[in-house]
Image (cartoon, rainbow, N blue to C red):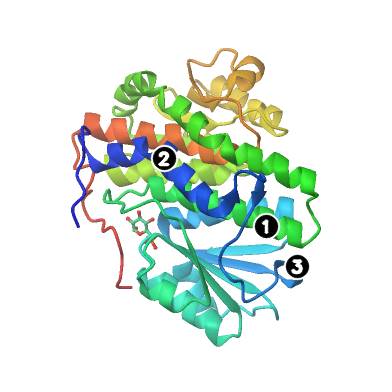
Amino acid sequence: LMVDKGNHRHFMAKEIYEQPETISHTLSHYVDMGAEKVAIREKLPFDFGDLSRLTISACGTAYYAGAIAKYWFERYARLPVDIDVASEFRYREPPLEKNGLSLFISQSGETADTLAALRYCAGQGQHVASLVNTIESTIARESSVVFPILCGPEIGVASTKALTAQLTALASLAIAAGRARGALSAEQETELVQALTALPSAVSAALGAEAQIVDISKRLSKAKDVLYLGRGPMFPVAMEGALKLKEISYIHAEGYAAGELKHGPIALVDEAMPVIVVAPSDELVDKTLSNMQEVAARGGKIILITDPEGAKTVGHGVADIIEIPHVHSFVAPILATIPVQLLAYHTAVFMGTDVDQPRNLAKSVTVE
Ligand code: G6P
């Protein structure tokens, strides 16, 4: 397989910059652009309308895709969702409800723990679906329905374009489930589909913050610890941001639910620990503002990722604001992954690490 870096210094940079096209490509599979409706082409061996529960298992970045999707399936489809990392799920022997759907998210389709979780669910009589990039993979072969993410080969060990493709597909599936379950009207479906189709150009615009992110990353590369905060679907975005940073820059980072700040991590906040707050304007942004004030009161340096509206309402006194375009809150978590990818990438470049092949990590973990 021949894939080259083009004009980019690393595969990771190339893959970050490909995202407007890869998201469009994923969308063209899941959305009927003319009708502005979701169109699932795969033959479903179950009816979304009859499902009792959705159980998601995955590892690494794919797990955070599922963690974001949980908010969508619950809110837009009123479908109860359980999610766990596959390495925990597989040994818990969880009781599974009749007529439940188990969904496995895996870029490679070969992750050992995810495959073991799949086999457990199949043995329990669950409907088994997978969301993969590699169609010719073990996880795909053992699933009764396979949803492709269609982002092309991902070479960088740290996942980027596969994450946004997974999210695009999951958002489409959540809309399909919402329609089948009577939780969304035809008008609401159109509104959400329009939000999805607006994403590629919003992602291009978000990539435009690169020069500013390089500047911030230079300072981040001097930090020993970095805290990422978010609420709602921005909480998994915060955890993904922390994962990316530690994977490729080797700087210790943690993602936390903003509301949990006072239950622990606030003890660590001082002038030396940057706090990255992922908070585009939404119904929760005021809550996050009070967490930012708690950080600021202890001398913490905030880097705020938000949209123009959020910058106006919660950006006062914040040293660094990384602006992303305003989009529908449904797709905001997808867009918010872009600046966290760029922050991790440029920090790693300043650290001089092997960005595409970070130490001790593998692209696909086929052993336990
Ligand atoms: C490894 C990779 C991650 C990936 C995870 C899950 O840890 O370094 O980038 O998210 O495996 O891989 P999968 O192929 O199942 O999505």
Image spot of residue 106 (x, y percent): 42, 62
Of the numbered discs 2 and 1, the one sitting upstream in the chain is 2
Image spot of residue 157 (x, y percent): 28, 51
Q: Nearer the viewer, mark 2 or mark 3?
A: 2
Quadrant for residue 108, please give it.
bottom left
Q: Residues within 10 Å of mark 3 (few under 14, many from 20)?
A: some
Identify the residue position indicated by label 1 in the image.
176
Classify mark 2: helix, strand or loop: helix
Image spot of residue 238 (x, y percent): 50, 41
Q: Image check: 252 left or right of 355?
A: right
Q: Nearer the viewer, residue 206 or 236?
A: 206
For the residues marked 2 and 1, what is the alpha-carbon distance in whole angstroms? 23 Å
Q: Residues within 10 Å of mark 1 (few under 14, many from 20)?
A: many
294 relative to 13, above or below? above
Tell me what residue is drawn at x 39 percent, y 67 percent. Answer: 135
Of the numbered discs 1 and 3, the one sitting upstream in the chain is 3
Classify mark 3: helix, strand or loop: helix
136 relative to 33, above or below? below
Of the numbered discs 2 and 3, the one sitting upstream in the chain is 2
Residue at far top of view: 317
Identify the residue position indicated by label 2 in the image.
21
For the residues marked 1 and 3, what is the alpha-carbon distance in whole angstroms? 10 Å
321 relative to 195, above or below? above
Q: Which quadrant of the picture is home to ligand 1?
A: bottom left
Residue type highlighted by circle 2: Glu
Asked if residue 257 can be seen in this view, the reply is no
Contact, mark 2 vs mark 1 (Cβ under 8 Å) = no
Residue type highlighted by circle 3: Gly
Identify the residue position indicated by label 3 in the image.
49
Classify mark 1: helix, strand or loop: helix
Quadrant (top left/top right/bottom left/bottom right) for the C terminus: bottom left
Tell me what residue is drawn at x 25 percent, y 42 percent. Answer: 11
